[in-house]
Image: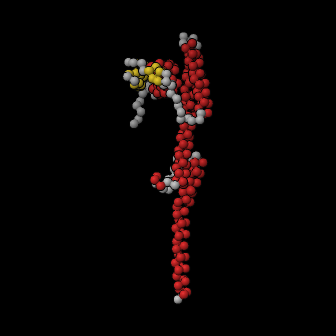
Amino acid sequence: NSVIQTLIPTIYWSAVAVGLTLFTRKKMRDTYEEPLHRLADATQQVAEGDFSVYVPTIHTADRLDYLDVMILDFNKMVAELGSIETMRTDFIANVSHEIKTPLGVIRGFSENMKENPGTKKREYYLDQIIRQTEEVDSLVKEMITTSKAADWKQVKIGDVLISVRSVIEDEMDRLEVQTEEKRLNVTLRCEDDWMLPADRKLLEQAFFAILSNAVSYNREEGRIRIVLKKGICTIENTGDNIPP
């Protein structure tokens, strides 16, 4: 009858409309709402200092839409922030260590002069103290310069040839007080003078870190053997081996 003929199409199209509405709602939730919620949660985590956040894209690389591009840019931004935070932390730790080193040398030479006021090496000790004081001043200036730098990733290495042997000899001079206290026997054998295009200050910091460990982690009356041969520097001591 006419009522059934009217009711059936109405129910059918109503069901179609409800189905389309539910389908559209689900697609909107899956495609936009949930990714935006994940992006908002990730943004909150970054604001709290967590730079390990990663938000996955919605589509594969060959089907990216504008929201995927936004997510990729967000992930790139977080990675850059994490990199800057790591560099900042490393920078503070390195500078703290580098300032501690010359201060320790100054203290060592000062105590040696106090205990031996008439020592023949007085002028030498004073020269070393002045040199280390200048080193601290240089480090402070470097801190100020680096903190103002626009890009911490740019590190320019000098193109002047530096004698590795002279750097090692200078750094061992800085450690003279410590080596004498432990009565260490230090030998340097150079089969060739390795000339390296480098920044002398950075090279000094690298060698001092290794040589100071060779002194600190050595036994009393031990030995430190340094060999320069064919572009390779070998530094050995008689301390305990590093555990595996």
**Vertically, is 20 above or below 122?**
below
Rendered view: 31 above or below 72: below
Q: Quadrant of residue 147?
A: top right
Q: In the image, residue 197 lies at what x, y percent?
A: 47, 24
Dividing the picture into quadrants, the one containing residue 25 is: bottom right
The answer to whether residue 216 is seen in the rendering is: no
x, y percent for residue 156 = 52, 29
Viewer-nearest residue: 38 or 48:
38
Q: Is residue 59 above or below residue 198?
A: below
Q: Residue at x 46, y 53 (%)?
A: 62
**Residue 15 seen in render:** yes
Kindly identify the residue that appears in the image at 55 percent across and 45 percent down. 77
Looking at the image, which residue is at 54% across and 10% down? 120
- Total marks drawn? 0
Give whichever of 21, 173 is nearer the camera.
21
Q: Where residue 225 sits in the image (x, y, percent)? A: 41, 22
**Residue visible at 47% across and 55% down?**
63
Q: Is residue 155 left or right of residue 226?
A: right
Scheme of colours in the image: secondary structure
Residue 49 relative to residue 194: left or right = right
| Image quarter in which the C terminus is found | top left
